Every structure is written in structure tokens, then in C-alpha cells.
Amino acid sequence: MHMRLHPFLSILCLAVLPSCQSSSAPEAVGTLEVTAVDLAPMVPARVVRVLVQEGALVRAGDTIAVLTQAGLRDQVGEARARVTSAEAQVQELERGARPEEITKAEQDLAAATAVATNAAAELARARTLASNNVIAKQQLDQAEARSAEAEARRSSLVLALWLVKAGARAHRPTAAGADLARARSALAAVEANVGDLV
């Protein structure tokens, strides 16, 4: 006499039987068949070569296909250029002004001081001549404008020289360092994309 077990009862037996054994980890023997598995690359890319055959055994981390991405090499080059630029900015801020820049600022100030002194002397002469009605009011106005302009330029160059000697503001090197860190991070991300494409 053959008895046919109900499928639910046979599953129940399979679940209960392992608890009768001394081993605490359940074991099963069988074949698992998956009809379809969707794979997607980390970045959009074109498949260059498929390295495994359909139905082949693969493990996590195995390379399934080789991909390529147009323009990725350009992105790496651009990211490297941004890192180089950010490094140069940090170095420039750390070094401060070059002696040549300070000398140039001092020469510009000396020239502007001479022009302002000359313009002030011309203004003094123009005032004397205007008070004696020797020159027109328009000429006096022009002399005053030239003197004011020359003094404003001289004052501007005094400030420019002070700024060159003082160096960068305290927050600028910190901000440049943060820009460098962002550029390096972006480069690492692009290079990781290249690595993902194998």
C-alpha cells in the first residue's frame, strides 16, 4: 500500500527533522535555478567584451564584462587639472607675496606719490593764479580734479602695498585647502569609475 503525503506535510517533516539532529545549522542539498538576473554597471557605459558564458558559475566580485565609457579619460584629465590648480593655489597662499610683487607695489606707490605731489603743487599755483584772475575758473577746476585723482590713486596704492605685505586673509588658506580636498575627492570618484569599468 502506497501512501501519498500531502506536500504541506512533507515540508513540515523537512523543517522538523533538522531539529532532531545535534547540528544547529540547517543544511539543504539541491539545485537553485534562477531564470534571469538583472545586472547593471555602476556608471553608464558600453559593453566591450563579455567574459562569462551563460550558465557559468560566478561569485561576488567576479568580472562579468568589460565596459568602456566615452569621455571618461577626459574627465580624469580634467579632474587632475583641477587638483593641480587647487594645489598651486594653496602653495601660493602659504608662500605669500613674492619679493618682486612687493617691489613692484612699492615702485607703483612711489610713482603715484610723485604724481600726487606734482598735482598738489599745480593746484597751489592754479589757486594763486585764479585769485588774481589770471586763469579761468575752469582751469582751477581741472587742477583740483587732477590733484584729487592723483591723491586717490596714491591712497589706493598705499592700501595695495599694505595688502601685498600682509598676505592672504586668514580664511583664504582654509578655503583653498577645502577646495583642494574637494578636487581630490572628485578625482578619486572619477578614477573609481574607471576602475569599475575594468
Image (cartoon, rainbow, N blue to C red):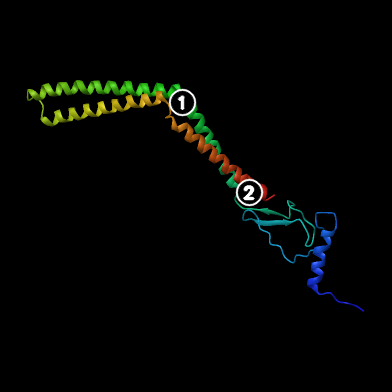
What's the amino acid at mark 1?
Gly
Crowdedness near tag 2: few (<14), some (14–19) or many (≥20) residues, C-alpha within 10 Å: some
What's the amino acid at mark 2?
Asn
The residue depicted at 33 percent of the width and 26 percent of the height is 159
Eyeballing the image, is 122 above or below 33? Answer: above
Viewer-proximal residue among 47 and 127: 47
Q: Say whether residue 106 is visible.
A: yes
Which residue of the protein is positioned furthest toward the bottom in this rendering?
Answer: 1
Where, by quadrant of the figure, is residue 79 drawn?
top right
Distance, label 2 to label 1, CA atoms, is: 37 Å
Numbered circle sitting on residue 168: none
Side of 128 where 171 appears, left or right: right
Eyeballing the image, is 80 above or below 124? Answer: below
Tag 2 and tag 1, C-beta contact below 8 Å? no
Mark 2 — residue?
193
Indicate the position of residue 155 as horizontal and vertical percent values: 29, 26
The residue depicted at 49 percent of the width and 29 percent of the height is 92
Where, by quadrant of the figure, is residue 15 drawn?
bottom right
Q: Secondary structure at mark 1?
A: loop
Viewer-proximal residue among 128 and 102: 102
Side of 151 where 2 appears, left or right: right
Viewer-proximal residue among 9 and 117: 9
Mark 1 — residue?
96
Q: Secondary structure at mark 2?
A: helix
